Amino acid sequence: MSGLVKADAGWVAIESDPEFGIKVQRVRFFEVDDEGVRPLVKNRDGLMVEPSHRTTDVIRATPINTLRITALRELLRLAGRATTQKQMNGIATGQALIMRGPVGEELTEGPG
């Protein structure tokens, strides 16, 4: 037996593509059946589908924390390609700015 459950606000699927970077999609529903729970997102045709196989996380977070998480993931991707100490220093500076946030707040967990 299968059923759909509407996702609460804040649920997103984060996709990490080595070539194109990070993509965030809002989770609209969860499909629940005997095999488990799967998130569903809207595709370009407006159909509800499972996120791409490149999806790394399905989380519930505030918009600012979602932005922080995706920015940190992008920095990790860049760190994997960095070849100089100057590039690594720039990545560390970016990480510090992201963690501090726009008004000096530390990164927090959970929806909000």
Image: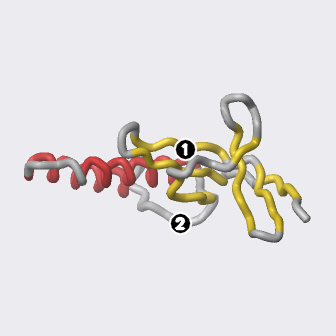
Residue for point 36% across, 51% down: 98
- Which residue occupies the foreground of this view, 84 or 71? 84
Q: Quadrant of the N terminus?
A: bottom right
Q: What is the spatial separation of the Cα atoms under label 1 and label 2, in whole angstroms?
A: 18 Å
Is residue 34 found left or right of 109 in the rendered image? right
Q: Where does residue 13 sit, x and y in percent of width and height?
A: 59, 51
Is residue 93 found left or right of 37 in the rendered image? left
Residue at label 2? 109
Residue for point 45% across, 49% down: 16
Could you tell which of marks 1 and 2 lies nearer the N-terminus? Answer: 1
Of marks 1 and 2, the one in the foreground: 1
Q: Where does residue 74 sit, x and y in percent of width and height?
A: 36, 47
Q: Residue furthest right?
A: 1
Answer above or below: position of 35 versus 92.
below
Residue 24: which numbered mark, if any?
A: 1
Question: Disc 2 on helix, strand or loop?
Answer: loop
Answer above or below: position of 37 versus 40.
below
Q: Quadrant of the C terminus?
A: bottom right
